[in-house]
Amino acid sequence: MAKILIVGCGAIGSELAGVLSTQGLDVTGLKRKPPLSAPGPVSYVAADISSAADLAGLDSDFTEAFFIVSPDNRNEQSYRAVYETGLNNLLTKLSEAHWIMASSTSVYGQTQGEWVNEDSAAEPDNIPSRLIRQAEQRLIALNPANIVVRFSGIYGPGREYLLRQTIQAPDIQQTPPYFTNRIHQKDCVGVLAFLLEQRLAGKPLAQCYVASDDDPAPMWEVISWLAECLHCPPPRVKAIGIEAGMNKRCNNARLKALGYQFQYPSYKDGYLELIGTRDNWYFFHEEQ
């Protein structure tokens, strides 16, 4: 039976651990501060991946491993600790494991509304995204069978930034449109579990998958729709030059062709559930 390690057990990693353990798989989570109670029969190891000494006692016979980490801060030092030092320590310890890395669509530097997919140039213009891209390359260079999953903007319970922004009637770029890409947290878990299932079934897999829902949309459209749902004032038009960036649009065709079906194919599906009852609307207002 596959022996699975999940490195980074935040909201996504811990939920993934629960899903896989209920399928009867042998799952271990690695986290600096493991939870007191684990979802299902999940074992936990306390370790800081930036410390090789912390990983000394970790089993080295894991056959499958997930790398689902988040830096402590949005600065170069924190990103290097995770995507450089931490990943190098793990790959040295577990060079024989098959890895699935949770990456980010921030590795794409396109800014003019282009559609991007797995074959598009990934040449980011900022240091954190460059470090993520270098981590992707290191993982694939170690073993071409390893997989990189590029998630777009993640939202869901505990990730309600856009809802909080909406009720403040923010200034939003309207023309040219600034495109946004999202994926619900549950679909992040679903995609990772699905790819593992396909791998264990012996299906041929690509080295990279873009994981974003079916509905990239202009931020103006998203915030305007959310304001209507929340009965808030609409956003204000942000004064901006005609040369303003438009971001990119993420194409998920490769993932869907493999057979994955999104639980939340549009931001409207996910945010309607988050907004829920009118009581939630009061909650968001009271927090301002």
Image (cartoon, rainbow, N blue to C red):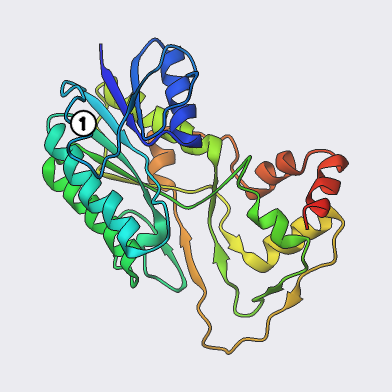
| Residue located at (76% from left, 58% from top) | 225
In terms of secondary structure, where does tag 1 sit?
A: strand
State the quadrant of the C terminus.
Answer: bottom right
Residue 262 can be seen, yes or no = no
Given residues 74 and 99, the one toward you in this image is 74
Residue 50: which quarter of the image? top left
| Residue located at (57% from left, 89% from top) | 242
What's under tag 1, amino acid-wise? His
| Residue located at (44% from left, 39% from top) | 256
Q: Is residue 114 above or below residue 56?
A: below
Residue under label 1: 98
Q: Is residue 157 left or right of residue 127?
A: right
| Residue located at (42% from left, 11% from top) | 41
Residue 235: which quarter of the image? bottom right
Q: Is residue 258 left or right of residue 179?
A: left
Given residues 148 and 251, the one toward you in this image is 148
Query: Residue 146: horizontal and vertical position, in percent?
Result: 21, 38
State the quadrant of the N terminus.
Answer: top left
Query: Residue 240: horizontal and vertical position, in percent?
Result: 62, 86
Q: Is residue 261 left or right of residue 2?
A: right
Query: Residue 152: horizontal and vertical position, in percent?
Result: 47, 53
Query: Residue 86: horizontal and vertical position, in percent?
Result: 24, 45
